[in-house]
Image (cartoon, rainbow, N blue to C red):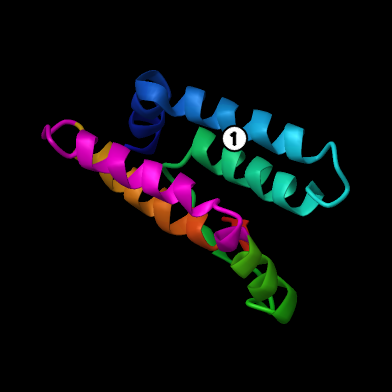
């Protein structure tokens, strides 16, 4: 089921979403201040590329003070819009019965994009 879900995900826009995450991550890594945010976008891009069968979980010793501060800065700088976009895509996919698993995955990714710092892919 995971393989079928990942293939359907890639065909129906997952590869485009992952590409956008990677490009935004590379752009942010150009500046020293943007490197932590760029790394998180790269991590989210890897997660979005093959989401079925993987999950984002808290890392060891997380959430720590630094990850909480960076998550707050992430939200204040407007990166919550990524989660909003995933919510809208999830609602659109849930209109059809076939799209429900993909819509639920968008909801799961939306939750992961709200607080990305201190998470690791498992």
Specify whether residue 115 is painted magenta.
no
| Direction from residue 86 to residue 57 in the image, left or right | right
Q: Which quadrant of the structure image shows residue 76?
A: bottom right
Judged from this view, the residue extending furthest toward the right is 32
82 relative position to 99: left or right:
right
- Residue 104 drawn above or below residue 64: above
Instruction: Name the residue located 76 percent from the left edge and 53 percent from the top edge.
Output: 36
* Above/below status of 115 relative to 52: below
7 above or below 90?
above
Looking at the picture, how far across and down is residue 35, in whole percent? 80, 48
**Would residue 118 be visible to someone looking at this image?**
no
Q: Which residue is label 1 attached to?
A: 21
**Viewer-closest of 23 and 72:** 72
Please identify the residue farthest to the top as the structure is shown: 11
Quarter of the image where the C terminus is located: bottom right
| Range drawn in magenta | 74-98
Q: Residues within 10 Å of mark 1 (few under 14, many from 20)?
A: many
User: Where residue 88 sits in the image (x, y, percent)?
Assistant: 29, 41
- Quadrant placement of the N terminus: top left
């Amino acid at each position: 089921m995971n393989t079928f879900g990942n293939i359907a995900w890639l065909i129906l826009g997952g590869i485009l979403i992952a590409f956008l995450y990677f490009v935004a991550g590379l752009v942010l890594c150009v500046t020293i201040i943007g490197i932590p945010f760029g790394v998180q976008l790269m991590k989210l891009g890897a997660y979005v590329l093959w989401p079925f069968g993987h999950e984002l979980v808290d890392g060891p010793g997380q959430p720590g003070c630094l990850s909480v501060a960076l998550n707050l800065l992430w939200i204040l700088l407007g990166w919550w819009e990524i989660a909003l976009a995933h919510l809208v895509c999830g609602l659109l996919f849930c209109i059809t019965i076939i799209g429900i698993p993909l819509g639920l995955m968008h909801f799961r990714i939306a939750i992961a994009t709200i607080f990305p710092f201190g998470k690791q892919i498992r």
